[in-house]
Amino acid sequence: MKKVLALVLAVVMVCTMAMAITIKPADPAQPGASTGKVPVLANIKPGETVTFELKDADGKEVLYYTKDGKFVPANNVVTVTFAKGAEYVESQGWVKTGPGDLANAYQYQIKFKSDLNKITDTTVPEIQISGVAFKATGYNAVTLLKASKPDEILGYSFGYEKEELNPVENDSSSFSPIGGKVNVVASLKDKNGKDVAALEVTVNGMTYTLTKGMKFYALDTAITFDATKDKGYSGNVAPKALLANLYNMPAKGEVALGVDANTVYKVYAKGVDGKVLSVAATNNDGVLTFNVPAMTTVLVTTETLTTTGTVGTTTNPGTTTNPGTTTNPGTGANDVVGVAAALAVVALVSGAAISLKK
């Protein structure tokens, strides 16, 4: 096993573009420079997964311990030392991500906890990695990182960007949350311009109750129903209504049936985890009312879909029945579903090259 190894940290997410940036150790305010401060190399979002790929200085795979030609995770130990931010880690270890039993079928991953209300400060390294070591059975332990001073620590900010909102009564254009961010209600005004503590805002058939100071995450894109995945949904029957709630808060839905007032409609909600729930609705003289769970799309249709649960008329749909509370909203899945190398940071510490891709 070569003594000089490269440790590549890749923040895994689904995106369409990738950009690599190499930071040289000799540059000011970069790892290895005498800044006296922990640098912020990148931002990690809650729910994201960081993967480690162990390679030599030439970019070749290092020698792992194998048994009968098969990679053995327990005999290839990666130790990551956190100077700060270990409480944000949900899990870490080897994960099988590909076919076969060789080392390239595995990734060492650190998954960070989901927190849809966590606001980042990109100047503060809330996550700090001060040491990384690798030990394969039969080979000497290799120190990849051992920071002896603050500017040798790998620092990352943690959370989502913040967007401030200032909704005004009867002005739906003043309520425009930004996807991929934590939206904070900075102020609320009634139709006369007077400051109020709470306000109801109706957008696209959904009514939200806002309070001053509240914060909520917003999805980038709406969740869609899929005829190949959602049993009972054909995609050929025009829905009576389709309400996309992009926000991590429940809403009240209302659909006027018009000439179809006597038609029996069923209401379903699909969350970011792909699960479909049956939604209890009330028909009051041709007007359907129902709860819209947080971060779901609600379908009003005559079709009968297969469901995994029910959203009631009195239970807060944004709590126990919300399919989106435990799933990384950036990907729509708890597992790693795609790799986009969007940021590479290279540092030279203790003779080892350390790079980060995001």
Image: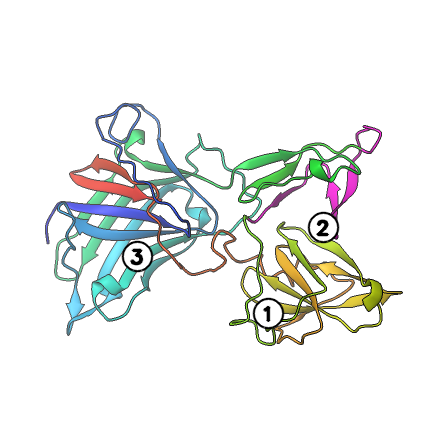
Residue 348 image point, x, y percent:
20, 36
Which tag is nearer the camera, tag 1 or tag 2? 1
Residue 231 vs 336, above or below: the answer is: below
Residue 341 vs 224, above or below: the answer is: above
278 left or right of 46 in image: right
**CA separation in Å, label 3 and label 1:** 40 Å
Q: Which residue is mark 1?
A: 235
Which span of residues is magenta-colored?
190-219
Return the disc, 2 or 3, that comes first in the chain's sequence: 3
Residue 218 image point, x, y percent:
59, 46
Residue 216 image point, x, y percent:
62, 45
Residue 356 vs 229, above or below: the answer is: above
Return the disc, 3 or 1, that comes first in the chain's sequence: 3
Q: Residue at x 56, y 44 (%)?
A: 179
Mark 2 is surrounded, within 10 Å at the Cα level, by few (under 14), some (14 to 19) or many (20 or more) other residues, namely few
Residue 123 vs 54, above or below: the answer is: above
- Position of the N terminus by quadrant: bottom left
Mark 2, secondary structure of its residue: loop
**CA separation in Å, label 2 and label 3:** 44 Å
Mark 3, secondary structure of its residue: strand
Query: Are circles 2 and 3 on residues that touch, CB within 8 Å?
Result: no
Q: Amino acid at mark 1?
A: Gly
Q: Which residue is mark 3?
A: 108
Q: Amino acid at mark 2?
A: Asn
Q: Amino acid at mark 3?
A: Tyr
Q: Which residue is mark 2?
A: 204
